[in-house]
Amino acid sequence: MGLKGKKIILGVTGSIAAYKSAFLTRLLIKAGAEVQIIMSASAFDFITPLTLATLSKRPVLSQFQNDNTGVWTNHVELGLWADLFLVAPISANTLSKFANGICDNLLSATYLSARCPVMIAPAMDLDMYQHPSVQSNIQKLKSFGNILLDAESGELASGLSGQGRMMEPENILSKVEDFFSSREDFSGKKVLITMGPTQEALDPVRYISNHSSGKMGLALANAFLARGAEVFVVSGPIYLTVNKAGVHWNDVTSAKEMYEAASEIHSQVDICVFAAAVADYAPSEVAPEKIKKDNTSLSISLVKNVDIAAELGARKKQGQIHVGFALETENEAENAKIKLSKKNLDLVVLNSMKESGAGFQVDTNKVHIFHSSGLSVQSEVAPKNQIADLILDQIKNIPVWV
Ligand code: PMT
């Protein structure tokens, strides 16, 4: 049962190959997966929802609103539920919608909401498949990190012969099984992640903080979870909707609290990732009452906060892996490498405030990862969940990784 417990959304669109989705559904179910089918309107011309509902043992979804009950089908929840979003077959029309962010049905809305990896299996006639529009949509979707299950060559419904046949269901199944098995590469590993900002109180009303949203840390937590790790999170105050299921989650406010929580956990984990934007300084004293606005100016004395990564770096045990971040605005690589050694890190992930699409708040990041061994890897701007997977892949390149 290679897919036991895996939740897969299977999108079916308007292609003659849609009949193969019935075989594919049966194979996925037999392999132990839970399969939720979403059909595009034109898929109904090629296969009945009854067939797919029977095989998947779940009602087939297609509209935002369920005709009989008027209940809204929540594409966001679907997107969060799935471990994998597989569209097989994907028609030229749906390829174009996905590539250009068109959102005019439940399938395309769920695609845009999905946080899980996406696999697409095109199926169309060979001239359509070779058309530059289709090919550029496919390349664009690959550049977003979607996984292409490329069309196979052979006899096509039109009687022509060439590339355009949907990958055979058995081959799709093995691609899906390979995908999940390669993604259990952190099973048995315990991981601590610090994430989000810290808030350093000035008085009962005011605090000093920064712009960290927690998105990078959350992407890392999801990536480690998806790849089999046991995840411990210590998070500063963030305002994202978080699915904390399966995560040992600790909410903290100040750097001191983050340090105390992280210290508690540190000795029991194999990997630490310090993604938090920890305030380097805190007010030397917290006013017991709200500071009055009597004077025209107010000066505050600040004291240095504990450097969590450095403190725990000094306690790093043989076999433990520490990954830090460097958020820089100048001399980026040099400053990142200084942190790499000063904090006894194995990897430092540099993100520069000068790069658009990188750093605080945004859904993407652009990183330059430096290994203590001297190796370094750069990324383009990419969604933070892909950057997280890249960081995990780099952790596996650390010599102590056994
Ligand atoms: O949360 P997002 O909105 O998604 O933004 C992501 C991010 C920009 C916050 C993230 O990618 C990032 O860069 N996090 C580290 C930010 C930071 O504090 O960088 P730094 O260069 O100041 O710190 C260097 C390293 O030491 C970091 O691993 C940091 O977690 C750690 N540190 C720093 C200070 C301190 N007192 N304790 C620490 O542990």
Image: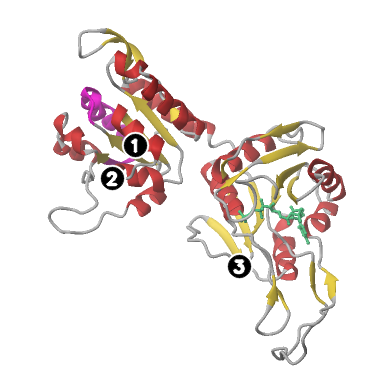
Q: Which residue is mark 2?
A: 104
Query: Do labels 1 and 2 touch, CB within 8 Å?
Result: yes
Q: Decide whether residue 148 is among the magenta residues.
A: no
Which image quarter holds the N terminus?
Answer: top left
Quick one: label 1, few (<14), some, or many (20+) residues within 10 Å? some
Question: Which residue sits at x=48%, y=61%?
Answer: 241
Q: Which of the 4 image quarters holds residue 267?
A: bottom right
Q: Is 18 on the left or on the right of 223, as rendered?
A: left
Question: Which residue sits at x=53%, y=36%?
Answer: 183
Residue 8: mark: none
Q: Which residue is mark 1?
A: 97
Residue 12, image x, y percentages: 27, 34
Residue 260, image x, y percentages: 74, 67
Q: Which residues are magenta?
A: 14-37
Quick one: label 3, few (<14), some, or many (20+) residues within 10 Å? some
Instruction: Measure the C-alpha gap from mark 1 to mark 2.
Output: 9 Å
218 w.r.t. 11: above or below: below
Q: Nearer the viewer, mark 1 or mark 3?
A: 1
Name the amino acid, label 2: Asp
Of the image marks 3 and 2, the number of the one nearer the N terminus: 2
Residue 237: mark: 3
Question: Which residue sits at x=68%, y=57%?
Answer: 276
Residue 125, image x, y percentages: 27, 16
Q: Is 49 on the left or on the right of 210, as rendered?
A: left
Q: Which SS type dominates the magenta stretch?
A: helix
* Residue 386 visible in this rendered orientation of the protein: yes
Q: Secondary structure at mark 3?
A: loop
Of the image marks 1 and 2, the number of the one nearer the N terminus: 1
Query: Do labels 1 and 3 touch, CB within 8 Å?
Result: no
Name the amino acid, label 1: Lys
Question: Which residue sits at x=35%, y=38%?
Answer: 33
